[in-house]
Amino acid sequence: MKTLGRTDLPAEQQEALKKAIRWEWFTIGYTIVTITLIAFVVSGSQAMRTAWIEDMLSLVPQISFLIALLLIRRPPTLKHPYGLHRAMGIGHLVAGVALLVIGGDLALESILSLVQQEHPTIGTVTLFGHTIWLGWLMVGVMSVIIIGPFFYGHAKAKLAPKLHNKVLYADADMAKADWTTNVASIVGVLGVGLGIWWLDGAAALFISLGITWDGFKNCKSAILDLMDQRALTHDDKAPHPLLGAIVHELEALPWVRSAAVRLRDMGQVFHVEAFVVPRRHKVSTEQIEAAREAIVTMDWKVQDAVVVVVPTLPEEAVHDIAKTA
């Protein structure tokens, strides 16, 4: 009998995880550099300050991912019989709440500045003996730092499906959309330079609404998973195909008349509860264990599985493969 609560990964997923960890550490280093650069030029632009805060917030998903990895590797115990896989979901929720709360606060601040018609000012700076408008340095910095997120965002987006990791996917999604923040901040700064004072506040509002939306999406996804909704794909766009595959695998067994399954997303792996209606009244423990082994070996994401023999299938379990589409 295979140990319940498996924490091992196949070779492909191990390699993907190593790459993901490297990208996360690279992203943290890159983000710290961008935060430092923006700090030198932020000045009185609200759009720049909002973009600066967004960069700080973008560290939360990466840190949550790395901390959760330390916990999910621990095997199940009597105190935690399902292991600590939920740590990944908790990390997802923490990142979502941070984005939602601070993004909402920044949005309100941007709205108030527009309503009160606050006119931002961007001064000058002496550089190599020449006095230049600080706005040009802002534009230059934001134009340069946009390069990194484009590359590591797409790299993480390719790794997230392999690991079925929603924290990594959310991080990648935010990185790929980071260019909008940079463009908005540039527009805001140039607006101040052209005398269009409200463009800076509007750009700040646009950036903060983006942060809030990212927070809302991540909070919703994390909360629903922690509430044990039916397992979905890594991007939450559809029921996970493993639902139908498990039902098909069980119903292919000669002693099974019909089957249904409840699939619980534990953060990066699944817990399966399978229900089977046998063709005969007598079912051996060997048959049940063989069915459980068949489920566990179907996909690396199956952390553990329980097979229950029942007279009728429960309505809340998936037994119609067509409904998983």
Image (tube, helix red, strand yellow):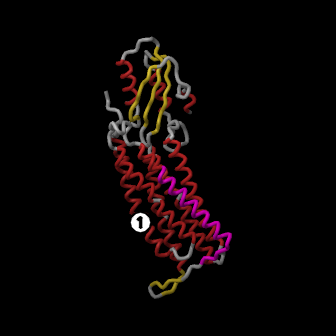
- Work out which quarter of the rendered image holds the N terminus and state it: top left
From what the image shows, is residue 176 above or below residue 245?
below
Percent x, y of residue 41: 49, 75
Q: Quadrant of residue 75?
A: top left
Percent x, y of residue 193: 61, 78
Q: Amino acid at mark 1?
A: Ile
Residue 249 forms part of the magenta stretch = no
- Magenta stretch, overall SS: helix
Q: Quadrant of residue 212?
A: bottom right
Q: Which residue is mark 1?
A: 32
From what the image shows, is residue 162 above or below residue 258?
below
What residue appears at the point 45 percent right and 11 percent down from the top-left corner?
280
Is residue 168 among what the camera can see? no
Q: Residues within 10 Å of mark 1 (few under 14, many from 20)?
A: some
What residue appears at the point 60 percent right and 59 percent down from the top-left corner?
209
Residue 110 forms part of the magenta stretch = yes
From what the image shows, is residue 239 above or below residue 209?
above
Number of numbered callouts drawn: 1
Residue 283 horizontal side relative to residue 190, left or right: left
Percent x, y of residue 302: 40, 34
Is residue 241 among what the camera can see? yes
> Is disc 1 placed on a helix, strand or loop?
helix
- Work out which quarter of the rendered image holds the C terminus and state it: top right
Q: Nearer the viewer, residue 224 or 2?
A: 224
Q: Which residues are magenta?
A: 93-120
Percent x, y of residue 78: 33, 36
What residue appears at the point 47 percent right and 66 percent down from the top-left corner?
145
